[in-house]
Image: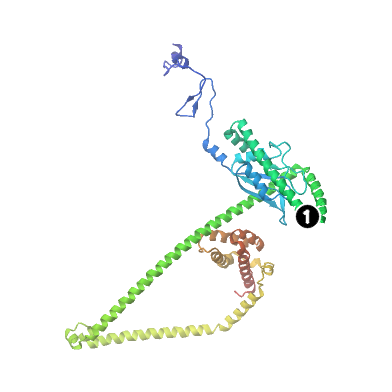
Amino acid sequence: SPSVQNSGNRRPRGPKYADRGMPHHGAPLLNPFGSPMLSGPDSKEQPPVNFNAKRQSENRPIVAFISGIAEGVSDIWVEKLLKTCGDINSWRRVCSADGNPQGFGFCEFKSPNDAASAIRVLSSTDGRKEGGWSLPSIKPTQQKLMIQVDFSVKELIDECQEMTNPAASAKCATDDELVQSVEGIIRELEAAVIETSQTDETKDEGGAENDDGADNTNEHAAVNAESGDDDGEKVVSLELEEEWEKERARSKRHKRYILAAEEREQQTIAKQNERGDRIKWNAMRDLDEAEEKQHQRDDMSVMLSKWDDVQQAQMGEHSYYRDRQRWWRHRKAERAREMELDDADRRQQEREACASEKPASATTERRDLIEALIKEIPSDPKALFEWPVKWEKVNDALIKSKIEPAVRKRLAEYLGGEGDDSSVSELSDYVVTHIREHKPPQELIDELEMVLVEEAPTFVARIWRFVVYESEAHARNVT
């Protein structure tokens, strides 16, 4: 046939679909060796599904920026609203320098689906509530609750929704139920706000008028804030997100040090148990040795009580009975060697005493200078941290020989670990780097508070006092 001639006189292994007489219904066929489905002749090839990537995307935490929180609304109500829409890992509200909570913060959702549910239900831009949600407060405000994520995170959420979402009708029904739950929570919040305002008015009527004036000011400020530049808001949110990431990193580092401290505690307990067992074993060994010596003394007493000098002389087993003169010569030689060793020890002690008396005056003078320097360095942390350190004297040799061992020793005392412990070494390297870069002590206190908690100021004061002393001692040549 022509087909056979065109293929180089080679017959194909089987006819085409139409020649085989197999019915074709347009449905894909199962392919046990390749992709999950083998397309028919009229359908397009489907790309393989990466189930591992899908599973990782569905379980990835999502950090969202929450804004539009009215003044006076506590974190308990905000968490209640967020948890109604999905599972969250944490909620952190940003506070001002004086500790007052701001109207925005960051929430970490457990998965993209939880974040998408919160955006659909609560956000004023993409939410199902027309006009958005306004949280009730004692002071009237026009702010709307807003949930924002990065563009890349938004794409990830949309991708997860396309892969895992159920039918549109089922989704809308679920969102409607969530909207009803949120409405119930807001009604509870409104009732709590009304009750609080009535209590405040009863306590102080004059203060209520001042509060009204402040409310109007805050209302105008809120309106002006909403009408501000969007670029400025994005810059602020990026800065807050960076601050939040730094806080999370510090929290993770704190958890790591807590786990390391627990591990060191377990190691310490194991070492104490081992030491106790060793002490018991040594005590038992000493008791056995004492009993053995006592048995030897008893045997010796019995032997001496039955000793017959004439019989031993006749037997001649001991060197004393065989040749007394030879035995006496050996004994005098041994005694002479013992006396020579005693005289050498006595002469060595006399030389050491003379050598210590010569520099006694110089040692006393140097000791007085050191004591004066120690008294001159203040003990109060505030005055100590203001002391001008002579950094030109704090070189690498001084840091490696004295400061670094002192830091490692103090950290081992505070953390309860050994000097060669990994966490102690890591924290010691951080402290030494801080000193080598001539950074202020207050920054070191702020960083170490995550690990040493209330003991951080005391630890930094001790280390800083040691650094001041070494720099002054090298500058005054009293080391």
- When the figure is inspected, residue 36 is found, relative to residue 256, above or below; the finding is above
Residue closest to the far left:
314
- Left or right of 187 on screen, residue 49: left
Quadrant of res 112: top right
Residue closest to the far top:
1
Provide residue 203's location: percent of width, then percent of height: 78, 57
Quarter of the image with the N terminus is top left
**Number of numbered discs overlaid on the protein picture:** 1
Name the residue beneath numbered marker 1. Answer: 202
76 or 466: nearer the eye? 76
The amino acid marked with disc number 1 is Thr
Provide residue 478's location: percent of width, then percent of height: 61, 75
Residue drawn at x 31%, y 84% is: 334
Residue drawn at x 58%, y 32% is: 166
State the colouring used for the structure image.
Answer: rainbow
Quadrant of res 229: top right
Provide residue 366's location: percent of width, then percent of height: 60, 79
Quarter of the image with the C terminus is bottom right
Provide residue 55's location: percent of width, then percent of height: 54, 39
Q: Determine if residue 346 is in view.
A: yes
- When the figure is inspected, residue 290 is found, relative to residue 179, above or below; the finding is below
- When the figure is inspected, residue 128 is found, relative to residue 207, above or below; the finding is above
Residue drawn at x 60%, y 52% is: 249
